């Protein structure tokens, strides 16, 4: 760690290592020119303590030990064949060059990744094919092509405030949005409904994974 509290991984390739990013006083910077293969990364820091600058992750496992909230920097990473475990809230993955003009945001990608051991709420896949990914099952649920299917999804009555606040606004998501995942108990609490009432409507659509 340098005098500014930065722990930097760059200009190297790392294989078969376990990296613990858990120091609450450190700022972890991964990249540029960083490739990790078959590594396990233990994340127990807030989003503001973690910065990605075009790292490449291949067949890595991310163990999220502390809820990672509103972390858009995944779109500055290349992720292939990776697994995610733990709580991810308001995180974006994939290719979203419009998010920032910084160079590492122009090359994000995600494919063949597994989220089945993660809890996801308000998380999006941007600019990449979600069909190569494995999403968490119920009580999480995932809208696939939420913008393209927005009118269809808005054609039925949703419980509580979920229809008015979320479904009717799907068309306003950023253009690269390819999927959108929610955690039913969390969203039900916010939208004055229940997971069971949500599921009764979710089951009517083939564009929702649950």
Image (tube, rainbow, N blue to C red):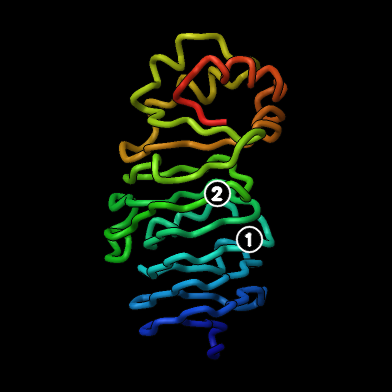
The front one of 184 and 208 is: 208
User: What number is the disc on residue 64?
Assistant: 1
Quick one: label 1 or label 2, which is nearer the N terminus? 1
Report x, y in % for residue 161. 61, 19
Q: Count numbered badges in the picture.
A: 2
Report x, y in % for residue 160. 65, 17
- At a point 45% along the width and 17% down the height, the residue shown is 153
Q: In the rendered view, does 50 fall on the left or right side of 58?
A: right
- At a point 57% along the width and 83% down the height, the residue shown is 5
**For numbered disc 1, what is the local secondary structure?**
strand
Quadrant location of the N terminus in the rendered image: bottom right
Q: Which residue is mark 2?
A: 115
Report x, y in % for residue 97. 28, 53
Q: In the rendered view, does 44 fall on the left or right side of 30?
A: right
Report x, y in % for residue 11. 36, 84
- Real-space Cα separation, disc 1 to disc 2, in angstroms: 12 Å
| Image-quadrant location for residue 20 | bottom right
The front one of 203 and 178 is: 203
Label 2 CA crowd tier, 10 Å (few <14, some 14–19, many 20+): some
| Mark 1 in CB contact with mark 2 (< 8 angstroms) | no
Quadrant location of the C terminus in the rendered image: top right
Label 1 CA crowd tier, 10 Å (few <14, some 14–19, many 20+): some
Say above or below: 130 vs 13.
Answer: above
- At a point 49% along the width and 71% down the height, the residue shown is 38
User: What number is the disc on residue 26?
Assistant: none
Given this view, does label 1 or label 2 mark the residue nearer the observer?
Answer: 2
């Amino acid at each position: 760690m340098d005098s500014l509290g930065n722990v930097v991984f760059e200009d190297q390739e790392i294989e078969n290592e376990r990296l613990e990013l858990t120091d609450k006083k450190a700022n972890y910077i991964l990249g540029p020119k960083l490739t990790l293969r078959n590594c396990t990364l233990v994340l127990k820091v807030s989003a503001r303590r973690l910065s990605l600058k075009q790292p490449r992750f291949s067949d890595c496992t991310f163990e999220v030990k502390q809820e990672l909230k509103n972390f858009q920097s995944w779109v500055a990473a290349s992720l292939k064949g990776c697994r995610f475990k733990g709580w991810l809230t308001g995180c974006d993955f994939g290719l979203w060059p419009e998010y920032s003009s910084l160079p590492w945001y122009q090359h994000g990608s995600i494919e063949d990744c597994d989220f089945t051991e993660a809890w996801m709420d308000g998380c999006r896949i941007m600019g990449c094919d979600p069909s190569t990914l494995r999403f968490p099952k119920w009580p999480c649920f995932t809208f696939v092509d939420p913008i393209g299917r927005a009118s269809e999804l808005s054609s039925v009555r949703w419980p509580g405030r979920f229809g008015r606040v979320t479904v009717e606004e799907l068309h306003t998501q950023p253009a690269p949005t390819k999927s959108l995942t929610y955690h039913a108990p969390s969203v039900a609490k916010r939208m004055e409904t229940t997971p069971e009432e949500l599921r009764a409507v979710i089951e009517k659509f083939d564009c929702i994974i649950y």
